[in-house]
Image: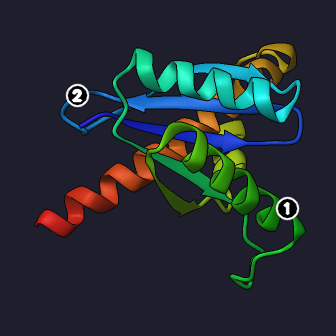
Amino acid sequence: MRILGLDVGEKTIGVAVCDPLGFTAQGITTIKRVGKNKDLEEINKICKEYSVESIVVGLPKNMNGTIGPSGEKILKFCELIKEYTNLEIRMWDERLTTVAAHRAMLEADLSRAKRKKIVDKIAATYILQGYLDSLSNKKL
């Protein structure tokens, strides 16, 4: 059961994938956004490379739980991903994942330049790991 995790931003898309058993998430890359068609091609290529069965996308919500303009953009982009890949898409509340990613990188004493390069990939890992943890908690 391979699941892809995405942290979709304006300029980049952080990408993570879980291990074949669905226990742990690993960040794999950051896609530089150049246009919807190229972005979708890149996501589809990764899905095929890792034999992905479903995709979890971080949904930015306001702190009160409502979906704002950026969340609406993500939902529209997810419809395109679903059409392009023909895979199931699940949304995951991504509130504070980027904050957590920055905190972890600060604790690891990474330079600002290194943090900037990998923050989206780390955030995608947090999104996917949160989803995987929720699945394992349901099994208990």
Image-based side of 86 in relation to 43, left or right: left
Q: Residue at x 22, y 64 (%)?
A: 137
Image-based side of 37 in relation to 82, left or right: right
- The numbered disc on residue 70 is 1
Observer-nearest residue: 82 or 25? 82
Q: Tag 1: residue type?
A: Ser
Image-based side of 101 in relation to 17, left or right: right
Q: Work out whether 79 lies above or below 34.
A: below
Within-10-Å neighbours for mark 2: few <14, some 14–19, many 20+? few
Question: In which quadrant will I find the N terminus?
Answer: top left
Q: Which residue is mark 2?
A: 20
Q: Residue at x 37, y 32 (%)?
A: 52
Snapshot quadrant of residue 124: top right
Element carrying mark 2: loop
- The percent position of residue 28, horizontal first and vertical second, equals 53, 19
Element carrying mark 1: helix
Q: Residue at x 78, y 30 (%)?
A: 37
- The percent position of residue 76, horizontal first and vertical second, equals 75, 59
Q: Work out whether 106 lies above or below 55.
A: above
